Image (cartoon, rainbow, N blue to C red):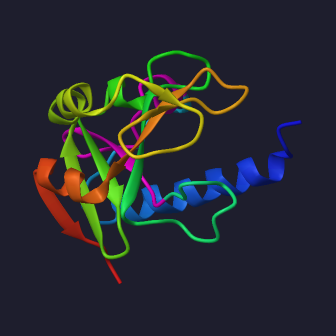
Amino acid sequence: MRGNNTGAKTRLKIAQLKEDSFRKLFKNTQLPTKKQDMFEHWDVQVNFKVDVKGLKKVKMKDKKPDENIHWIEIKNVLGNKGWLYGKADFFAFETHKYWIVVPKVPLQDWVAKNISKEFFSHPEMYKLYRRAGNQDIITLVSSHDLYFLSEVVLEKEG
């Protein structure tokens, strides 16, 4: 059994709070429709589209998120193109104090060059991973690498 919907609803609520936090850094923003969010994979438009990525845990059972890593979704749980290949122009990766804003194409190129094509049965940096029961393809990358790919790093409010 995959668990209950309570965890999924909580994660969605947390994601919404992260997106709102990022959006507050700008004066004029546009939000996606539900369809655009699901199929185009973007969360905020500020003359460009940004997909906001909050802090995540390496494993669900970990007590706290880890600001030193970020998940990259190459294929989603249905096996379709993941958010890395969506319509967002940039990705904003959260750390405790900053948003690391990375343009899509350089991140796509970096993933193609630096991620092993070999699948692993557990999450490991720079290795492909598929969660049990899903058709996704994801990988872990270092926030440090994202920083060097970034065009801007924005300090979070408060």
Q: Residue furthest top?
A: 80
Tell me if residue 135 comes above or below residue 114 in the rendering: above
Give the tally of numbered discs: 0
Expressed as whole percent of the image width and height from the top left, the position of residue 60 reads: 66, 55
Residue 53 colored magenta? yes
**Where does residue 116 sit, x and y in percent of width and height?**
34, 29
Range of residues picked out in magenta = 35-55
The answer to whether residue 70 is above or below residue 87 is below
Residue 12 lies left or right of residue 29; in this view the side is: right
Q: Judge whether 135 appears above or below 153 on screen.
A: above
**Measuring 59% from the left and 60% from the top, which residue is drawn there?**
14
User: Which image quarter: residue 22?
Assistant: bottom left
Residue 84 vs residue 133, the one in the foreground: 133
Q: In percent of the image, x 61 and y 25: which residue is there?
A: 77
- Position of the C terminus, as image quadrant, is bottom left
Q: Where's residue 148, x and y in %?
A: 12, 53
The x and y percentages for residue 136 are 56, 25
What residue is rendered at 39% in x and 57% in y? 69
Question: Residue 128 vs residue 156: left or right?
Answer: right
Q: Is residue 11 above or below residue 1?
A: below
- Whether residue 31 sits left or right of residue 2 in the image: it is left
Q: Residue furthest bottom?
A: 158
| Residue at 22 percent of width and 36 percent of height | 107
